[in-house]
Image: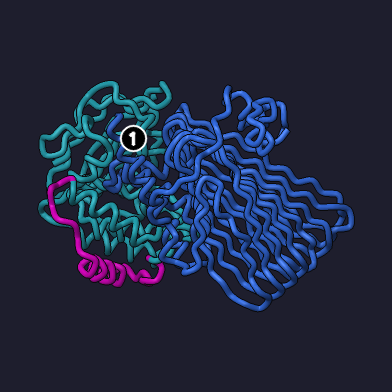
Amino acid sequence: MSLSTAIRDRDVAELPGKRDEAWRWTDLRGLIRILPPPSEPFTGDVGAGPFDALADDRRVIVNGRGAEPVAIAAGSKSAVVVRFVSRGSGAHLARLDISVGAGAKLQLLESYESDGGSLAQAVLTITLARGASVERVVLAQDSADAVSVSQARVTLAAHAEYSQTIAASGARRQRLETQVQHPGGHATVRLDGLYLLADKRHSDHTTVVTHAGTDGTTAQLTKGVVRDQARGVFQGRIVVAEGADRTDARMGHHALILSDRAEVDAKPELEIYADDVACAHGATVGALDEDALFYARQRGMPVDVATALLTEAFIGEVVDRIEHEGARDLVRAWAAERLARDGVANSEKV
Amino acid sequence: MLTVKDLHATVGGKAILKGLSLDVPAGEVHAIMGPNGAGKSTLSYVLTGRDGYEVTGGSATLNGEDLLALAPDERAARGVFLSFQYPLEIPGVPALTFIRTAMNAQRKARGEPEITAPEFLKLSRQKAGELKIDFDMLKRALNVGFSGGEKKRMEILQMAMLAPRFLILDETDSGLDIDALRIVSDGVNALRSPDRGMLVITHYQRLLDYIKPDRVHVLAGGRIVASGGPELAHELERQGYERYEKAVA
């Protein structure tokens, strides 16, 4: 079963669903009764993307069309904006190959932008040669009606550095999946995520990192804030293969649930077949600290102001880890705006 | 100023305050002393509106206005400030950001303009200096990794900057060494003024050598069981609370 086959053949039986362990919380098979028709080419103006000001090399992939491979020459430095844009309510698939040569450095600023009930899949292949460095910052701001799936397969060589931050606001169903083949060899991986969900939005952050060789490092931190009837999903798996000694892998997932009807499903997993490793995971899901909230209110902050301040502080750690300064500021502003807007929406309901 | 009449309150269904009455006029400092479990902290939380502290009878007013009908932040905007026995750590929020957010929220609630950034920095530098707090500490997350004494000093700093009208100090001396106690007390004493009232809650008389009260009340079994001048604190220090506890038992 695969989503791409389902889209190609318009065959709902091919859709992944809850019978697949990896898709148990993002059940597309149960959701979609009839596959939408293939998306038409879109010839209108798609407007500006969120990262446009941060790079001159900008790629816009609309309704699955226009994906040209990105190849970064050995030893060079590049910043590339990639926009996956969905217009209308059709189904489409985009494939994008990105290769980064030895010692090269790439800042990849990627966005998902949809405006309707589309079913979109993006499949990225990201390959880092020896000593290459990539920072990927993803802003997934989909339509509330969209089903949006992004799957990145990342392969590193020794001494490569791969850093990633995905910031997501959810969709009807949104899944951002990252699979990393980690060779060890003093390569380092940082995989971070941030989901801020309101209304009935759903966002699924699934990662699999496979450490195949010795001396590899992975640091993972995902934080989420859900309210209303939103649902956050975190599935993180780190596999340390036999013989992949001196692997250092850390995984953290922490979520705040700000309403009774919101939900977070989390499955952090460490599968360790090597002996000499330092691996740890930490996971918390809960409400905002009532004591801290009272403390802030005692000092004069109304509940929405106190909630926004404490929530921003909670997610700040993830934002601070973004190395690209412009992208970091942009994600911080995006998050603050979402929290403020949700806060206002929330207080209006009370 | 603060008038509490026949206040009854429960915590988790258990009656803690059982008819507490108290009158603190403007310009005065009143101490509340009492044994552990008498309801001292409950009184401070009931007056500031903490969830879980349910008022089942009586009243509490500040300058005639019903405090109990107001949300915690509305009470703060009216000038009620509680210095916590155990100040909270707020990860990710620099002390300056926290105080400025609080100050502007209070100003907004009172219909006043926000404080400008230069004014705020000037004020925080001045107050930090008076309390011998390193200004760089205010750029760090509030209270995170601070010592007990530093946390109490941060409470007094917030108090000095927010300039509340009615101050409640809950066991402010706990965890302070003698130097810190002097600095904190100086900070509190600097806030004494004819239009400001203070309620100093403490188990020990020691603090009252530094913050001299006009009146001392003994809280036992959820009620004020004795009131007197400053000499009452010394008497309690010598004789303990036993006879008051027996009286209410």
Q: Residue at x 13, y 34 (%)?
A: B65
Report the predominant secondary structure element of the magenta stretch. helix
The chain letter under disc 1 is A
Q: Nearer the viewer, residue A289 or B23?
A: A289
Q: Which residue is mark 1?
A: A346
Q: Residue at x 69, y 30 (%)?
A: A14
- In the structure shown, which secondary structural element does the residue marked by tag 1 occupy? helix
Q: Nearer the viewer, residue B157 or B108?
A: B108
For the question of whether residue A335 can be seen, the reply is: yes
| Percent coordinates x, y for residue A41 in the rendering | 49, 44
Total marks placed: 1
Q: Residue at x 71, y 48 (%)?
A: A208
Direction from residue A208 to residue A200 in the image, left or right = left
Chain letter for the cyan part: B
Direction from residue B23 to residue A211 in the image, left or right = right
Location of residue A206 by image quarter: top right
| Percent coordinates x, y for residue B80 in the rendering | 23, 45
Is-magenta flag for residue B69? no
**Relative to B69, residue A99 above or below:** below
The amino acid at mark 1 is: Asn
**Relative to A31, residue A214 above or below:** below
Residue range corresponding to the magenta coloring: B109-138
Chain letter for the blue part: A
- Residue lying furthest right in this view? A243
| Percent coordinates x, y for residue A272 in the rendering | 82, 49
Q: Residue at x 53, y 58 (%)?
A: A82
Is-magenta flag for residue B116? yes
**Relative to B124, residue A175 above or below:** above
**Relative to B220, residue B88 above or below:** below
